[in-house]
């Protein structure tokens, strides 16, 4: 077993509003979104770009003109040229991976203050030409006029039908299923009905709407300026629907299994989303030396990463949570609030059933007792990705930021954040608000 890392101090954090893809943030790149989040986090920490020792951001879609998007957004935000930056990709856990990577760097002593986060413009994930179309265009660019005439005879209308890289990215190449299809497997395995999923989705919208109405998210979100959106500045998440009803959700058709047996719809799944989030991190020792009298947002006390069958990737949080609890000799009862990313209602509900199942514990976790039950009163108390959205590279950071703020709002101490990862993995963080 590896030696536990000393506590990681989360000085402050911020995120952009999350917007459904192809809507309010269509014109804003992943680099620009990340820049807004980074500067917002620094402002809340009372720091400047010159104070930053290093930048680590998660990103999945890969902005074509900014392959190391962390470096580009750092420089454009004013972080000095001699401060390094790199980008990480663990699919849906990339924003959490950025925090973990920064933690190791800080403990190593390479930097003493890091901005970590995640950014994703799912709108701007590029389209890909087929191999035949690609080869034709390359030859066209090299050919003289006679060659171009010959190439015209080989032109096919299908060359104008590019492949959506986003669709490819949301499909697992090992098991051949898209993420929604893997969630349909879990719905059937755990007997989760369409109505249960819709009720969970409705609760997500109700809680996210209530959080905005009472001002909770206003202190978390920094606006994206009008000069970048091409319209008005975006100041709020676009996903939560105050008027959402169970009746409206029930009318939506299944989208991943149209055989008549499917239960997953656009309403009980997270939307494709644009957004970014960032946190300012340092070691607890450095925090005590630099800001001895200033409270910080909280601390990261432990983490776990785990693998599982890609066909059941939605159970990743169960395996990661089990690993974290076993490593640190904790139980689910030790946590006041819990966040499990809402990729799909079926997936979260499957995780809850798996953790409460003695049979699952015995067969899958090799434990004599189940992990335990998670009460909905302490799960995703401000709504989740079904309402807020899931910009894949940013969500892991958003979960940590929102959870620490939720704990502070309620005067609570300990939280657990987890999410499933495309490809069959899970990630979990243990967070606390007190030293």
Image (cartoon, grey):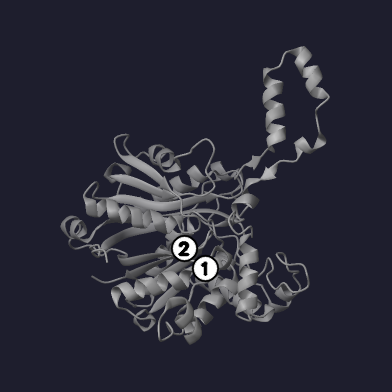
> Which residue position is annotated with label 2?
218
Q: Which mark is residue 325?
A: none
Residue 71 image point, x, y percent: 40, 39
Which quarter shows the N terminus? bottom left
Q: Residue at x 76, y 37 (%)?
A: 160
Which quarter shows the C terminus? bottom left
Residue 210 image point, x, y percent: 53, 74
Q: Which residue is drawn at 52% across and 35% down?
A: 65
On the image, which quarter does residue 328 sit in? bottom left
Of the pair 221 and 177, the residue shown nearer to us: 177
Q: Which residue is drawn at 63% across and 50% down?
A: 168
Secondary structure of the residue carrying tag 1 is: helix
Local crowd at mark 2 within 10 Å, few (<14), some, or many (≥20)? some
Q: Relative to 346, is 93 on the left or the right?
A: left
Q: Which mark is residue 212?
A: 1
Local crowd at mark 1 within 10 Å, few (<14), some, or many (≥20)? some
Between disc 1 and disc 2, whose residue precedes? 1
């Amino acid at each position: 077993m590896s030696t536990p890392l000393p506590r990681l101090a989360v000085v402050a954090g911020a995120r952009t509003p999350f917007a459904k893809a192809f809507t309010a943030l269509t014109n804003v790149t992943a680099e620009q979104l990340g820049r807004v989040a980074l500067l917002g986090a620094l402002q809340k920490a009372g720091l400047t770009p010159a104070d930053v020792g290093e930048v680590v951001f998660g990103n999945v879609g890969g902005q074509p003109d900014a392959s190391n998007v962390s470096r580009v957004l750092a420089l454009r935000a004013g972080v000095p040229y001699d401060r390094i930056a790199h980008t990480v990709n663990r699919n849906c856990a990339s924003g959490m991976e950025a925090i973990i990577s920064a933690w190791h760097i800080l403990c190593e002593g390479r930097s003493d203050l890091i901005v970590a986060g995640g950014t994703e413009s799912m709108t701007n994930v590029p389209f890909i030409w087929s191999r035949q179309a690609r080869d034709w265009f390359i030859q066209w660019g090299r050919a003289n006029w006679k060659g171009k005439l010959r190439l015209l005879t080989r032109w096919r209308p299908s060359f104008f039908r590019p492949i959506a890289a986003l669709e490819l990215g949301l499909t697992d190449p090992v098991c051949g299923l898209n993420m929604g299809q893997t969630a349909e497997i879990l719905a059937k395995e755990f007997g989760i009905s369409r109505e249960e999923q819709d009720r969970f989705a409705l609760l997500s919208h109700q809680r996210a709407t209530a959080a905005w109405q009472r001002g909770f998210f206003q202190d978390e979100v920094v606006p994206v300026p009008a000069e970048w959106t091409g319209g008005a500045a975006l100041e709020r998440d676009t996903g939560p629907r105050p008027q959402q009803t169970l009746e409206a959700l029930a009318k939506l058709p299944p989208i991943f299994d149209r055989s008549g047996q499917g239960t997953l719809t656009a309403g009980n799944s997270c939307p494709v989303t644009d957004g970014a989030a960032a946190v300012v991190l340092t070691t607890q020792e450095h925090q005590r030396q630099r800001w001895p009298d200033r409270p910080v947002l909280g601390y990261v006390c432990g983490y776990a990463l785990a693998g599982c069958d890609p066909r059941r990737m939605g159970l990743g949080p169960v395996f990661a949570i089990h690993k974290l609890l076993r490593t640190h000799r904790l139980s689910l009862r030790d946590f006041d609030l819990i966040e499990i990313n809402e990729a799909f209602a079926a997936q979260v509900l499957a995780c809850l059933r798996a953790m409460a199942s003695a049979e699952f514990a015995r067969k899958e976790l090799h434990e004599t007792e189940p992990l335990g039950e998670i009460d909905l009163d302490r799960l995703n108390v401000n709504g989740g990705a079904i309402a807020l959205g899931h910009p894949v590279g940013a969500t892991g950071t958003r979960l940590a930021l929102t959870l620490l703020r939720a704990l502070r709002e309620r005067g609570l101490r300990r939280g657990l954040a987890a999410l499933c990862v495309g490809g069959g993995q899970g990630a979990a963080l243990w967070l606390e608000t007190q030293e």
